[in-house]
Amino acid sequence: MEPVRTCVGCRARASRSSLLRVVARESVPVGQELVVDETATLPGRGAWLHPTLACFHLAVSRRAFGRALRVDGALETTTLENRLNGTVNHE
């Protein structure tokens, strides 16, 4: 049986394979940045999110990422939002 996690956006429970794991990482120019953990192996606390813009916007408006990841201050969410939009950043 596959593990079940809760989406920080809509608060619905879903299988782990249908959600994205997101972690906060230190980024030099911006401070804390949300990064998608593809393999679910990055260190630190993770938050689980349906890969939809609706759940992303719900999580941002509820400030759920900061609470779930236990991060004080602002989180940079542009990279995650671009990924959910289908926009690829080629830096």
Image (cartoon, grey):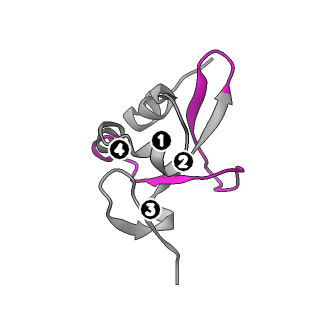
The residue located at (59%, 19%) in the rendering is 30
From mark 2 to mark 4, how far is it between C-alphas?
12 Å
Q: Quadrant of residue 18?
A: bottom left
Q: CA distance from mark 4 to mark 3?
A: 17 Å
Q: Which mark is residue 59?
A: 4
- Residue 76 or residue 36, whichever sits in front: 76
25 or 41, which lies in front? 25
Asked whether, in this view, residue 26 is left or right of residue 8, the answer is right
The stretch in magenta equals 27-56
- Is 59 situated above or below 33? below
Which one is in front in this view, the residue at disc 2 or the one at disc 3?
Answer: 2
Q: Residues within 10 Å of mark 4 (few under 14, many from 20)?
A: some
Determine whether label 4 and label 1 are within 8 Å by CB: no
Q: Nearer the viewer, mark 1 or mark 3?
A: 1
Q: Which residue is mark 1?
A: 66
* Residue 56, percent from left and from top: 35, 42
Amino acid type at circle 2 is Leu
**Mark 2 secondary-structure assignment:** helix
Residue 9, placed above or below residue 57: below
Mark 3 lies on a secondary structure that is helix
